[in-house]
Amino acid sequence: MYDIVIYSILGLIEGVTEFLPISSSGHLIVARSLLGVTSTQGLAVDAVLQLGAILAVVVYFYKDLISLLQAGAQRIIGRIPNQEDERLLLALFVGTIPALVLGLMLESFMDTVFRNTHLVAYALIAGSVVFIFAEYASKKYASKKGVESIGLWKALLIGFFQTIALVPGMSRSGMTISGGLFLGLSREASARFGFLLSIPIITGAGLKKFIELGTGGELIAIGLPLVVGSGVAFVSGLLAIHALLTFLRSHPLHVFTIYRVLLALSILFFLAP
């Protein structure tokens, strides 16, 4: 029962912070420190919890995903697909490449070097600085383009912004939203593209770590708590996605910037050794 409670808490944190621009990996590292969770498979467990969160993206954007799959299938069988859907599908494919390549290259660092509270605190502050400049750029150029304006070049650049989030504390959604703002997209369009862009990377990483947990035998011990935690991540993720998209229609990232700085200072003063 204790493990179920712990993993439910971790699942709630994952579901909410995966989509709000405040860093899920950073919050999970801090939460583990506060809860005294000492699993040697911390990154693997986090990745499996992310499967629950990413399922929330699939459910929330299921209409978009069906349209994208139809466009891909129509192109394969020789029919003419919807041009906007095909363009977005290609953009998502190109945008996935940077994080896929760099993620595989840095996997060993992510398991060890990247798992410390000092790094999380500094990354939270660094990400806040990126938010400030992104909002400034968005306001200066006064451009509020939609997802349909994302070509392959813009998709690649946003993909590189996603790679920055491999560092715990930076935030995947925060970096992709910032990348979109720098390129003239609206906040909502940036978030929508970022959420769709996260599906292949998080799904791939989660399944890989799930298999590793299974072959290592640890999945047997934490199987039920992990399933419950992933379920909590799914439900809380759905709510977080809807809340963020609604918020971004009329609000900048300032509140998240302030929260991140306050959290970073709290970590440095009270948690970091």
Image (cartoon, rainbow, N blue to C red):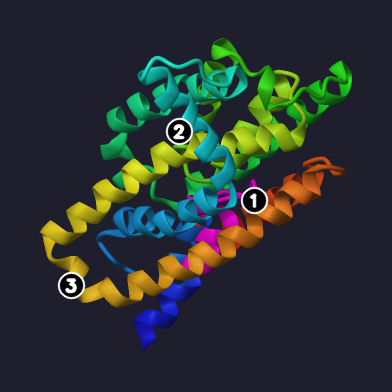
Q: Is residue 112 visible?
A: no
Element at label 2: helix
Circle on res. 231: none
Kindly identify the residue that appears in the image at 73 percent across and 26 percent down.
146
User: Identity of the amino acid at label 1?
Assistant: Leu
Q: Which residues are magenta?
A: 11-26
Kindly identify the residue that appears in the image at 54 percent across and 13 percent down.
152
User: Identity of the amino acid at label 3?
Assistant: Ile
Residue 192 lies, with reference to residue 98, above or below; the image says: below
Asked whether disc 2 touches disc 1, contact meaning CB atoms under 8 Å apart, the reply is: no
Q: Quadrant of residue 84?
A: top right
Task: Specify the quadrant that holds the N terminus.
Answer: bottom left
User: Identity of the amino acid at label 2?
Assistant: Leu
Residue furthest out toward the bottom: 1
Q: Earlier in the sequence, mark 3 or mark 2?
A: 2
**Viewer-nearest of discs 2 and 1:** 2
Kindly identify the residue that appears in the image at 68 percent across and 32 percent down.
190
Circle on res. 220: 3
Magenta span: predominant SS is helix
Place of residue 254 in the rendered image (x, y in percent of width and height, measured from the top left): 81, 43
Place of residue 29 in the rendered image (x, y in percent of width and height, measured from the top left): 45, 58
Q: Earlier in the sequence, mark 1 or mark 3?
A: 1
Kindly identify the residue that appears in the image at 64 percent across and 46 percent down.
21
Residue where numbered disc 1 is placed: 20
Crowd tier of the residue under label 3, counting other residues whose Cα lies within 10 Å: few below 14, some 14–19, many 20 or above: few
Element at label 1: loop
Place of residue 203 in the rendered image (x, y in percent of width and height, measured from the top left): 37, 45
Residue where numbered disc 2 is placed: 69
User: Is 40 covered by the magenta stretch?
Assistant: no
- Classify residue 76 as left or right of residue 244: left
